[in-house]
Amino acid sequence: MKTPLGIALIAPCLLFISCGASQMKPQCVITAAILPATATADHSASAPANQVQFSEKQTLSPTGCVPPPEPAEALACLPNWTTSDTVNTSVSETGLATCLNATPTPATIKQTCPNDGVVGAVPTPAALTCK
């Protein structure tokens, strides 16, 4: 009658494992956006009134999730800021955008890394209007 004793010993282990599995935290979903999402500056004003500081914000969800490990290249990434309107706007390597002239349509401000998509999300771009 080894079977009942074996089941008696294995059953608590299975219960423990099944309880532990329900306590595991879900993997995070990473979303990113450029802030502010929209901005306006006056090209005819002196700095800083003709400038807007943009930054990236990442959000992890759901609450309490376990973020994925970041590869070394993600930690070493220097973001590249770009503008869709290089005639009327400029943007520095720190995300400081400057209005050079009035923009006929809002300029799209983006931030990328060479390894975007490896970890995290490509940020939603922002819009800059220069008046």
Image (cartoon, helix red, strand yellow):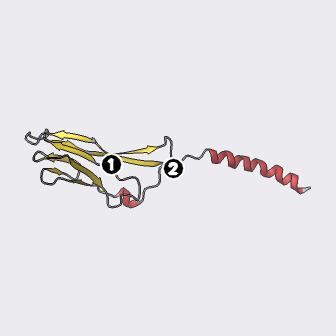
**Distance from Cα at disc 1 to Cα at disc 2:** 21 Å
Instruction: Answer with left or right where residue 108 lies relative to residue 42.
Output: right
Q: Nearer the viewer, residue 105 or 52?
A: 105
| Residue 53 sits above or below residue 93 on the image | above
Please name the amino acid that badge 2 sits on: Gln
Disc 1 and disc 2 in contact, CB within 8 angstroms: no
Image coords of residue 65 (percent x, y)? 50, 45
Q: Residues within 10 Å of mark 2 (few under 14, many from 20)?
A: some
Q: Residue 29 at x, y = what percent?
A: 46, 48
**Residue 124: assigned label:** 1
Q: Nearer the viewer, residue 44 or 68?
A: 44
Task: Check residue 27 in the rendering and tell me which mark sits there, or answer none.
Answer: 2
First in residue order: circle 1 vs circle 2:
2
Q: How many marks?
A: 2
Q: Position of residue 35 (x, y in %)?
A: 29, 42
Q: Mark 1: which amino acid?
A: Thr
What SS does tag 1 mark? loop
